Image (cartoon, helix red, strand yellow):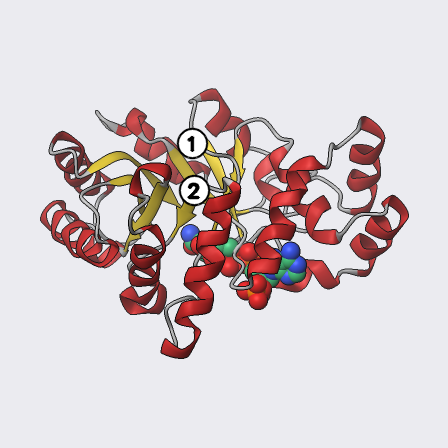
């Protein structure tokens, strides 16, 4: 799975933004940011349609991630929701299919639906999102629970709680952590501490925020950019190396957790 991808929340909501959004995603694919994250929820299916247009003719280059609503995540519901997503995405398969957050449907039912989709090659892998340590332990205790490939969670410089227990647990079980909202929906890029740090290094807040995430073992990230210039800027974050000195400075400005805290989510 590529470590740096592109998010699509808030895409597909307004027809007039569509060509700009498609162009931004295509620019990212041109650069090699080949993971695209979307969800049936985003734009009420609109984001999946934008993604379908962006990947047309280049499906083989893309690692496609989408998510099922918890209320659609029963054994049968997840199969039907997947079919609808495939139609909007105009593809025959999804590379990674996630439960968007935990709802009332027992995890065992969702896993059974995911496994059925995997057996019929509609999805290649499955995972979860917004599941904290206790939920992950419950999932891992299920017969096929160990097949979970990813937990997609809120994780950025100003929100490091998962480092206490969830990230180590995922590492132990070979489950990748996909960090969503790496810029805290853009707010982190206006953080004075981060701006000053970037200025001193002659780089940008976005580069530090992303390079820090990607420097960590087992962590991928999916910044969203509807602007192609932002996509290009995010791609350049791959060139920033986090030295031990920079890591210490980051830890001083954005301290790691000192105790267990519940998983934050948007
Ligand atoms: N699983 C979940 O529950 C969950 C929850 C939230 C998000 N997500 C996923 O994670 C993705 C990313 O999170 P997010 O959309 O919440 O927010 P984000 O990636 O933290 O921030 C997006 C904002 O940052 C701006 N931006 C991006 N790159 C920039 C750059 N280089 N310089 C300046 N500004 C930049 C974007 O502007 P422009 O758009 O104008 O370029 C946008 O306003 C989502 O799109 C979605 O796919 C998943």
Location of residue 214 (image quadrant): top right
Q: Quadrant of ligand 1?
A: bottom right
Q: Is tag 1's residue or tag 2's residue first in the polypeptide sequence? A: 1
The spot of residue 236 in percent (x, y) is 66, 44
Asked if residue 21 lies left or right of residue 196, the reply is left
Disc 1 vs disc 2: Cβ atoms closer than 8 Å? yes
How many residues crowd mark 1 within 10 Å: few (<14), some (14–19), many (20+)? Answer: few
The spot of residue 207 in percent (x, y) is 70, 46
Residue 256 in sight in this render = yes
| SS class, disc 1 | loop
The spot of residue 2 in percent (x, y) is 47, 34
**Label disc, if present, on residue 35 of the rendered structure:** 2
Q: Compared with residue 122, is residue 191 higher up or lower down, i.e. above or below? A: below
User: Which residue is located at x 13 percent, y 52 percent?
Assistant: 77
Q: Compared with residue 255, is residue 196 higher up or lower down, i.e. above or below? A: below
How many residues crowd mark 2 within 10 Å: few (<14), some (14–19), many (20+)? Answer: many
Location of residue 61 (image quadrant): top left
């Amino acid at each position: 799975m590529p470590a740096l991808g592109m998010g699509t929340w808030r895409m597909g909501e307004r027809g007039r933004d569509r060509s700009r959004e498609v162009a931004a995603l295509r620019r990212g694919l041109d650069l090699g940011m080949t993971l695209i994250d979307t969800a049936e929820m985003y734009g009420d299916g609109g984001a999946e349609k934008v993604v379908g247009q962006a990947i047309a003719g280049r499906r083989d280059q893309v690692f496609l991630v989408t998510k099922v609503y918890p209320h659609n995540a029963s054994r049968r519901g997840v199969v039907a929701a997947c079919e609808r997503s495939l139609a909007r995405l105009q593809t025959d398969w999804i590379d990674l299919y996630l439960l968007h957050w935990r709802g009332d449907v027992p995890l065992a039912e969702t896993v059974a639906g995911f496994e059925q989709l995997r057996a019929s090659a509609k999805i290649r892998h499955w995972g979860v999102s917004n599941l904290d340590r206790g939920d992950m332990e419950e999932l891992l205790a299920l017969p096929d629970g160990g097949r979970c490939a990813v937990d997609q969670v809120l994780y950025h410089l100003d929100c490091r709680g998962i480092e206490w227990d969830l990230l180590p647990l995922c590492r132990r079980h070979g489950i990748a952590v996909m960090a969503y909202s790496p810029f805290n929906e853009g707010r982190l890029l206006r953080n004075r501490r981060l701006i000053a740090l970037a200025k001193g290094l002659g780089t940008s807040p976005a580069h530090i925020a992303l390079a820090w995430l990607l420097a960590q073992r087992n962590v991928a990230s999916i910044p969203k950019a509807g602007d192609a210039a932002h996509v290009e800027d995010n791609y350049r974050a791959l060139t920033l190396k986090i030295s031990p000195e920079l890591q210490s400075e980051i830890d001083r400005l954005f301290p790691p957790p000192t105790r267990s805290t519940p998983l934050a989510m948007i």
